[in-house]
Amino acid sequence: MKIRILVMLICLLSFGVADAREIKSKKAISQSDYLSTKQYYSNLISGGTPQVAELNLFANMLPKGGDIHHHYSGAIYAETYLDWVGKKNFCIYRESDVRLKVEKYRIEIKPAAELAEGAGKICISADAVIKDNSFYRELLMRWSDKDYGNHFHEQSAPDQQFFDTFGFFGPVSNAAFHEGLQSLKDRAKAENVQYIETMLEKSPDVVNPHLAKLINDLKAEATEDETEAVLNECADFMDGDAAAKAKIDDYVKSLEEIATGIDDAAFKIRFQAYVSRNNSPAKVFSGLYAAFAAAKGSNLIVGVNIVGPENGYVSMRDYSLHMQMFRFLNQRFPGVKLSLHAGELVLGMVPPEGLKNHVREAVEIAMADRIGHGVDIAHETDPHELLEVLKERKVAIEVNLTSDSFILGVKNEAHPVQIYRHHDVPFVISTDDPGVSRNNLSNEYLLFITRYKPSYEELKKVVYNSIRYSFLSESEKLDELKSLDKRFAGFEARIAKLARSKRTK
Ligand SMILES: [Zn+2]
């Protein structure tokens, strides 16, 4: 009996040793894969000209974690929108006509029978668009940034070209949300992206004429107390208004329905509720109230944002008021995360004074958790101190290289990602509007790699930031980080194999 127990003990111990050996050898393999990948990558970026083609392959395969600055309607490609125009039997104007109030490239959603005779004649089906190759090409150029800079043609200013696209495809952008999300998921999975945090639909607004007058008439010189008193009255109204409550519930329900079945073991999607910064204060406030309430009430809506051209007249005029609204609503709805577009501006776009306070107020008044773009940082008041605040508070900057280059003309060494890197401010790489920009997240990483030549450690850290600074819950983040570890182990094993095969050639 004693001998049998002894044998069993010896067996158990030897199995334990074998397990430990296996874990140790797995660790040694993964460490060696990591070192090979690091060496391989560093060879590709070293020297005067990085090996762009090889790096393209590398960036496509690279696990990229999440895309956390992402607009749904700007992420769908124009070709997909045209498909939806066809499926819905909408038509597209191929000419402008002032008398009929119609504009070339715009979508008409009214049935053909309801159109005036003249309008009906110049509005063509998606099929007819595809058959007319030159109009089809022109349409893609107006519904996105395609071919904007590679040949001479009549064109509007880049920021206008960019924002106009939303007006063109807008009428059809909500035609097939679920199908759209599915296509974004397929694209994400194909390029090794596991998470998207997207802005899908504006939160609803409810305007009460009495309160609208109160808030819209707020003077710029109103004291904080005066502003707060008005916001309080508006918030109490929203709080007690049955119509507002119903709209917020519908909004949450519709997002939950759209997202049904999208998450799986290898992919997650979450939403940010948002408002447009160029609307009246009453609209912005009621929309923000709804956005905060929705985010508080649903695990699927993980944060709140504010969008639209930041250099617009209204958005510049009301910027500080918007930040006060955020601060006020933070107190009403504690715990709601904020990612704010702030500092998407350059000198010349607005007077220099307009570049001094947007990132600062987003961080210090609105208490943003993340900042979208943050391009004007060098012009902000006391930028070194502000950079210190961003670093200490771990406010991550969402860097959108293609979008900043197109809309603002800021690129290469002039891009402030260099400032954020040098001051240890956390940042992520994101796409903004990959459909309009006609790019993807891999290409954003390729730009980051070829322009700034980060070390492999820094590159990995930036990828991990996209999960660490996401608005997922802490336990979801842990799961996604584990999945990212696994993806990197697989990636590094493949690159190590590639490096070995290259060495033997
Ligand atoms: Zn954006």
Image (cartoon, helix red, strand yellow):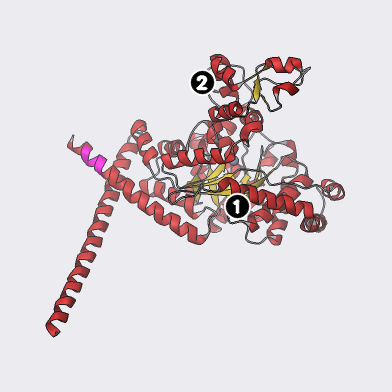
Q: Is residue 119 magenta?
A: no
The secondary element bearing badge 1 is classed as strand
- Label 2 amino acid? Asn
Q: Nearer the viewer, mark 1 or mark 2?
A: 1
Q: Nearer the viewer, residue 296 or 146?
A: 296
479 left or right, relative to 238: left
From mark 1 to mark 2, how far is it between C-alphas? Answer: 39 Å
Residue 374 seen in the figure: yes
Point out the tag, 1 or 2, that comes first from the N-terminus: 2
Residue 404 seen in the figure: no
115 relative to 163, above or below: above
193 relative to 151, above or below: below
Q: Which residue corresponds to the image point at 30% horizontal and 39% vertical from the top-left? A: 43
Q: Which residue is mark 2?
A: 150
**Quadrant in which the N terminus appears:** bottom left
103 left or right, relative to 369: right
Local packing at callout 2 (Cα closer than 10 Å; few below 14, some 14-19, many 20+) is few
221 left or right, relative to 53: right
Q: Which residue corresponds to the image point at 69% horizontal and 49% vertical from the top-left? A: 250
Q: Which residue is mark 1?
A: 301
The secondary element bearing badge 2 is classed as loop
**Quadrant in which the C terminus appears:** top left
Local packing at callout 1 (Cα closer than 10 Å; few below 14, some 14-19, many 20+) is many
Which region is colored magenta? 497-501
Quadrant where ligand 1 appears: top right
Rendering coords of residue 121 (x, y %): 70, 14
- Label 1 amino acid? Ile
Rendering coords of residue 107 (x, y %): 66, 26
